[in-house]
Image (cartoon, rainbow, N blue to C red):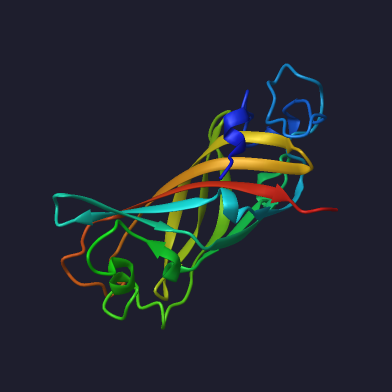
């Protein structure tokens, strides 16, 4: 699967992303350096998450020895983006926990973890994040506060976000970011041997919806 980050030549501010300059002419061109032709890299508007360029990784403590690593492959989301007005920004993401992928084992570990003893996806078929506020930090970093709902339990969560690239990729207008949050497992009703916060690591791209 391709990734436009291979073509990244530069990046912009989470607030000033729409003011970064670049060359949008060549098909397949990635985000260009700030010294390129003037133009909007990521104009205000509605964006949709690109599932083909998204990975959600959960690192779960394993009995104090290491971390189990799980990937969730089915995800959708929508971003409302205004580079001039952080208060207008919003993000909604939905994850299908049944899409969990695990390391290869003699048993179907993913099936066990999504069953009724753990994530119980039959009862809780989605996990969601709904933003409440976007906070710029510096030229390529910011924080997004919101409500994270897992297994029917909603808790506040803050994602640290890094801008990877933004610009034209063929006909697409793209924003690419990585994000990380630490999530508490308390109150989810999981077995007591599952303890400690879970680290969520997300790499994703958003495509601007056609006008």
Q: Is residue 199 left or right of residue 190?
A: right
Q: Quadrant of residue 136?
A: top right
Q: Is residue 76 left or right of residue 106?
A: right
Residue beneath the point at 71% across and 40% down: 83
Work out whether 160 lies above or below 92.
above
Q: Residue furthest right?
A: 211
In the rendered image, residue 205, in percent from the top left (x then y), is placed at: 61, 46
Which of these two is toward me, 133 or 74?
74
Q: Is residue 13 above or below residue 71?
A: above
Query: Going by the image, does 135 lie left or right of 43?
Result: left
Q: On the image, which quarter does residue 5 sit in?
A: top right
Res 93 visible: no
User: x and y percent of residue 45 in the render?
Assistant: 77, 50
Rendering coords of residue 44 (x, y %): 76, 45
Q: Residue at x 57, y 36 (%)?
A: 163
Q: Residue 65 appears at what percent x and percent y?
A: 14, 49
From what the image shows, is residue 135 above or below residue 195? Answer: above
């Amino acid at each position: 699967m391709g990734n436009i980050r291979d073509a990244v030549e530069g990046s912009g501010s989470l607030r000033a992303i729409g003011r970064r300059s670049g060359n949008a002419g060549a098909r397949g061109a990635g985000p260009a350096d700030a010294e390129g032709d003037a133009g909007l890299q990521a104009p205000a508007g509605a964006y949709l998450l690109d599932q083909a360029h998204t990975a959600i990784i959960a690192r779960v403590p394993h009995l104090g020895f290491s971390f189990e690593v799980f990937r969730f492959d089915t995800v959708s989301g929508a971003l409302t983006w205004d580079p001039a007005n952080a208060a207008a920004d919003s993000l909604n993401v939905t994850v299908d926990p049944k899409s969990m992928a695990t390391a290869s084992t003699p048993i179907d570990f993913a099936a066990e973890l999504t069953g009724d003893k753990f994530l119980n996806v039959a009862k809780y078929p989605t996990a969601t994040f709904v933003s409440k506020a976007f906070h710029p930090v510096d030229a390529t970093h910011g924080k997004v506060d919101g409500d994270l709902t897992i297994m029917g339990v909603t808790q506040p969560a803050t994602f640290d976000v890094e801008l990877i690239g933004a610009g034209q990729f063929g006909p697409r207008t793209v924003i690419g970011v990585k994000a990380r949050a630490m999530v508490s497992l308390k109150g989810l009703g999981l077995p007591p041997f599952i303890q400690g916060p879970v680290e969520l690591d997300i790499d994703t791209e958003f495509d601007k919806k056609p006008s």
